[in-house]
Amino acid sequence: MEELNNIDNSLLSEISDIEKILDGAYNIRKNGKGIQRKSSKNIEIKPKEDGTGIDIIVKENTKFEFVHIPVIITESGIKDIVYNDFYIGKNSKVIIVAGCGIHNDHHKDSEHNGIHRFYLEEGANVKYIEKHYGEGDGEGKRILNPVTEVYLKEGSSLEMETAQIKGVDSTIRTTKGELQSNTNLVITEKIMTHGSQTAKTLFEVNLNGENASTHVKSRSVATENSNQEFASKVYGNSKCFGHVECDAIIKDKAKVLAIPEISANNIDANLIHEAAIGKIAGEQLIKLMTLGLNEKEAEEQIIKGFLK
């Protein structure tokens, strides 16, 4: 078991809480390999036989337990790919905390691609939290390309919260869902880009079963010369409900592109898409500036509240 150094602990504190990590079942991955791992009575974490990742197996009727699977990268020039599969037993209720932090002080790019697949049995409930963070003084880029696949059996639900905190030069974030009857998928995404950073989000959800539902909410801030793209596809294949919201603030020379696609393939499919992109409202700035803030401080306060 490899010990954690100061940089490791700092990265983990940005994407998770090290004390909470050590309390339950967890797997810590560093520079392309697992360095610490612990299972619990109801949650087994085991490496795949081919060495490509881990399987997380949650027993049925497991209630209110945590699983932490953080990834940290501290070496320049690494391209890490990992496949993590989650098997959530019937009527279980668990919280899974993931995320990746990259520290890059050199000239080579560092990249992590995490492919997470969730298989929820009937009545299972999962809250999934994922944070991404980058830091370092080197010219090498910090690249994160997460892929999340969700397969929900009847009566199950998954709530997903994702946040790109700062320091990520390039990201493509892909989420796909296949929903059976009486299931619910809720996704909340928060992204901030600056400099010449790029961020692309791809959502694709198939509402296959009767009374399946999804609510996707994306909030983003793009500043300086950064670029963002948000593309969502929701297919209503039965009596179902889908709601997608994309709200973005742009500053300076930043650009944001929103591409909605909703397809009602059943007469009882109810699908909604909303998108709003614009600069910070002048009346908001004026209101805060009358309270004693300068323009920059007022903008920061508005952005912080928008992404909260």
Image (cartoon, grey):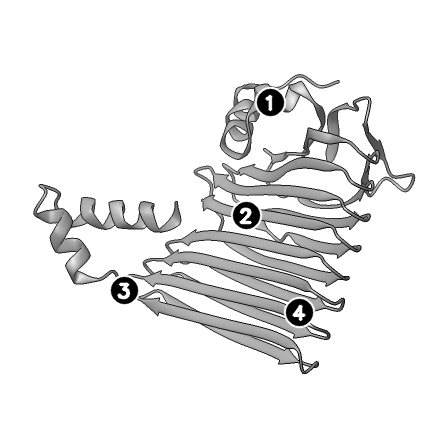
Quadrant the N terminus occupies: top right
Between marks 4 and 1, how big is the CA–CA gap?
Answer: 37 Å
Q: Amino acid at mark 1?
A: Lys
Quadrant the C terminus occupies: top left
What residue is shown with label 3?
A: 279
**Contact flag, marks 3 and 1 (Cβ < 8 Å):** no
Between marks 2 and 3, how big is the CA–CA gap?
Answer: 23 Å
User: Dot 2: what SS?
Assistant: strand
Residue plotted at (65% across, 80% down): 264
- N-terminal label among 1 and 2: 1
What residue is shown with label 1?
A: 20
Q: Amino acid at mark 3?
A: Lys
**Contact flag, marks 3 and 4 (Cβ < 8 Å):** no
- N-terminal label among 3 and 4: 4
User: Dot 3: what SS?
Assistant: loop
Residue plotted at (33% across, 57% down): 223
- N-terminal label among 2 and 4: 2
- N-terminal label among 4 and 1: 1
Q: Amino acid at mark 2?
A: Thr
What residue is shown with label 2?
A: 162
What residue is shown with label 4?
A: 240
Between marks 3 and 4, how big is the CA–CA gap?
Answer: 34 Å
Badge 3 density bin: few <14, some 14–19, many ≥20, Cα 10 Å? few
- N-terminal label among 2 and 3: 2
- Taking the image as drawn, is residue 140 in sight? no
Q: Nearer the viewer, residue 84 or 134?
A: 84
As drawn, the residue found furthest toward the right would be 49
Residue plotted at (68% across, 53% down): 148
- Taking the image as drawn, is residue 305 in sight? yes
